[in-house]
């Protein structure tokens, strides 16, 4: 408005100046023309000037009004705005200074300016946030106090544990020092133990070697003693001579049984009982073992019965030799203690026929002298028999049943005995074997062999064989020669494998008896050369029987693996030799001669 007043003043002044100038100009022109009188002109000019002044004054009054309005209006507006701002500021200040009241007393009032309302909303939101922040702050403070208390308690516990840990560290250090001393002593003890173990292994090997050597060295002369006594008993002797010869033969057999039992028991006690696991014909093993006692039972008039149930697998996996030994020990006892009646061998399968393992039960029942309850309690102890009178009457070491018990337990089974005095005894052995075949075989009374024989003719005359023998001991050569002659065969004898191979290259041979331990060339080397064709290609598959004084575990299996067909342990008995040759003749498919 001040600018408008200024503009109006300038315009009014210009208008006044123009009016004054025009009046003066008209006066001069009229005066110069002389058409008008001076007084008239003067009056006109004055009238024009007064009118101009009046108009100028009006303008100036308007300008003054505008100036006053321009000055007072901002002042009044400023004053109004100041009051308005002050009121809004007071309201805003009240909201800011009393956020907890949420301005409830101001609900009837409103802000005059939108900016203040927006500011109030921002302040209100800020207050809410502040409240929440303060609430969280108080909660955090409470939590902090609680955490601080926990930390203090934990610090106290840690201090205590630190003290305990320091104490434990000291104790651990002492324990470590003690442990180090113990470790040093332990290392020293381990060194001594290793040295002792090495010495024990050396001693064990030496013991095994000694057992093998002693077995061979003792059996070799015993073979001659027992063999010659058996042959002597077959000659014409008077009653006194026959009694002496029978006593020598019985003593030799007792000594051989003692050697066998002591060797087996020594192996078991030393922990060197190794069980083989290979497939074998279980039914054939039972039959073959029982057939060995056929002759003894016939001499005593005993009936020998074998009952193999259908569930017994024909094939099994286990240690065939140990199964034979267990059954052999039980049968030997039954034959020894049974004077009349019968001996029954029963085999059954107590497990499912389709199971991967079979629980084979072997029962040997006799009608012998039986045992009392007290005798049963000490039956399976080493070197124990029923009583001393039985030892004097029947002989024996008392190791057979102890060995049988250990063997049965080693094969995952057990042995039990039931008996009453004077009513015989029943021994039951359970053996845990792997089942490798699903079908069993039924058997009745066992026949030792089935050959076309004639009472008037010897077996060697019916089945002639060209036999050679490799044996370095002269006495054993003589015994085997007499036994073969009794059976109807003759043989050629050689001291080692070299002359044997030379003879076989020049002559046809059907059967070879091969001793294992011979000078220059032993039985294993000679067998390998025969199988390799060095004795002639036609002899590469000739039947070879191992003939050895060794009778330790694994000897037979080693012989069979080396290429031999059968195994005979010294001392050889005539009936055992006849049985083995009969089985081989059947397997060779020889036909009887007319």
Image (tube, helix red, strand yellow):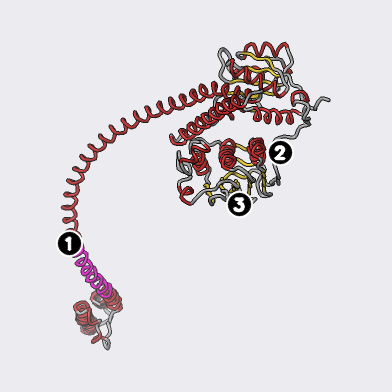
Q: Up-down: is 491 above or below 174?
A: above
Q: In the picture, residue 125 is in which quadrant?
A: bottom left
Give the mark, 2 or 1, whose residue is nearer the N terminus.
1
Q: Point out residue 24 in the picture as x, y percentages from the top left corner.
A: 24, 76
Q: In the picture, residue 279 is in which quadrant?
A: top right
Labels 1, 3: front one? 3
Q: Point out residue 359 in the picture as x, y percentages from the top left corner.
A: 58, 48
Q: Secondary structure at mark 1?
A: helix
**Disc 3 crowd, CA 10 A, few/some/many (<14, 14-19, 20+):** some
Asked whether, in this view, residue 288 is left or right of residue 22, the answer is: right
Q: Point out residue 500 in the picture as x, y percentages from the top left corner.
A: 65, 14
Asked whether, in this view, residue 432 is left or right of residue 295, the answer is: left
Look at 78% across and 31% down and name the residue there: 452
Look at 66% across and 35% down and name the residue there: 295
Q: On the image, numbered disc 2 is attached to which residue?
A: 447
Alpha carbon separation for disc pair 2 and 3: 29 Å
Q: Is residue 55 magenta?
A: no
Q: On the image, numbered disc 3 is attached to which residue?
A: 351
Q: Up-down: is 571 above or below 123?
A: above
**Disc 1 crowd, CA 10 A, few/some/many (<14, 14-19, 20+):** few
Q: For this rendering, which residue is in front, 139 or 82?
A: 139
Q: On the image, numbered disc 1 is attached to which residue?
A: 152
Q: Is residue 128 magenta?
A: yes
Alpha carbon separation for disc pair 1 and 3: 71 Å
**Disc 2 crowd, CA 10 A, few/some/many (<14, 14-19, 20+):** few
Give the mark, 2 or 3, whose residue is nearer the N terminus.
3
User: In the rendered structure, which segment of residues is drawn in magenta?
Assistant: 127-152
């Amino acid at each position: 408005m001040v600018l408008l007043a200024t503009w109006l003043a300038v315009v009014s002044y210009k208008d006044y100046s123009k009016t004054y100038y025009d009046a003066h100009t008209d006066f001069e022109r009229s005066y110069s023309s002389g058409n008008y009188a001076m007084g008239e002109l003067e009056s006109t000019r004055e009238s024009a000037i007064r009118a101009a002044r009046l108009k100028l004054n009006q303008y100036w009054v308007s300008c003054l009004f505008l100036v006053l309005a321009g000055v007072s209006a901002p002042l009044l507006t400023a004053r109004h705005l100041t009051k308005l701002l002050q009121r809004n500021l007071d309201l805003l200040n009240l909201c800011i200074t009393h956020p907890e009241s949420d301005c409830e007393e101001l609900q009837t009032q409103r802000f005059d300016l939108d900016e203040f309302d927006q500011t109030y909303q921002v302040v209100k939101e800020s207050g809410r946030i502040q409240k929440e922040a303060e609430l969280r702050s108080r909660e955090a403070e409470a939590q902090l106090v609680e955490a601080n208390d926990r930390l203090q308690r934990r610090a106290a516990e840690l201090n205590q544990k630190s003290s305990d840990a320091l104490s434990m560290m000291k104790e651990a250090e002492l324990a470590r020092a003690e442990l180090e001393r113990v470790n040093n002593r332990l290392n020293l003890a381990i060194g001594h133990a290793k040295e002792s173990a090495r010495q024990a292994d050396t001693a064990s090997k030496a013991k095994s070697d000694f057992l093998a050597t002693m077995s061979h060295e003792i059996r070799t002369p015993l073979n001659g003693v027992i063999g010659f006594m058996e042959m002597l008993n077959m000659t014409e002797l008077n009653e006194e001579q026959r009694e002496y010869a029978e006593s020598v033969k019985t003593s030799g057999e007792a000594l051989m049984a003692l050697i066998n039992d002591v060797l087996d028991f020594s192996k078991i006690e030393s922990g060197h009982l190794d069980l083989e696991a290979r497939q074998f014909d279980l039914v054939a093993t039972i039959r073959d073992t029982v057939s060995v006692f056929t002759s003894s039972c016939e001499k005593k008039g005993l009936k020998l019965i074998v009952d193999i149930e259908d569930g017994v697998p024909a094939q099994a996996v286990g240690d065939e030799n140990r199964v034979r030994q267990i059954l052999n020990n039980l049968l030997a006892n039954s034959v020894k203690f049974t004077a009349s009646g019968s001996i029954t061998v029963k085999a059954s399968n107590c497990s499912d026929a389709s199971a991967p393992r079979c629980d084979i039960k072997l029962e040997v029942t006799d009608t012998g002298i039986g045992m009392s309850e007290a005798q049963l309690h000490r039956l399976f102890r080493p070197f124990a028999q029923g009583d001393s009178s039985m030892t004097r009457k029947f002989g024996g070491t008392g190791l057979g049943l102890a060995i049988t018990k250990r063997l049965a337990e080693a094969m995952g089974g057990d042995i039990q005995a039931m008996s009453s005095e004077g009513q015989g005894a029943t021994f039951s052995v359970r053996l845990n074997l792997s089942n490798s075949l699903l079908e069993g075989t039924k058997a009745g009374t066992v026949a030792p062999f089935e050959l076309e024989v004639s009472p008037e003719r010897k077996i060697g005359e019916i089945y002639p064989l060209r036999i050679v023998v490799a044996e370095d001991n002269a006495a054993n050569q003589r015994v085997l020669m007499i036994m073969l002659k009794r059976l109807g065969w003759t043989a050629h004898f050689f001291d080692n494998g070299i002359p044997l191979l030379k003879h076989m290259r020049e002559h046809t041979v059907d059967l070879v008896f091969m001793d294992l331990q011979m000078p220059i060339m032993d039985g294993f080397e000679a067998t390998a050369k025969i199988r390799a064709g060095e004795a002639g290609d036609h002899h590469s598959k000739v039947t070879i029987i191992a003939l050895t004084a060794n009778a330790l575990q694994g000897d037979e299996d080693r012989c069979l693996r080396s290429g031999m067909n059968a195994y005979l342990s010294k001392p050889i008995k005539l009936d055992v030799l006849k049985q083995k040759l009969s089985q081989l003749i059947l397997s060779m498919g020889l036909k009887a001669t007319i």
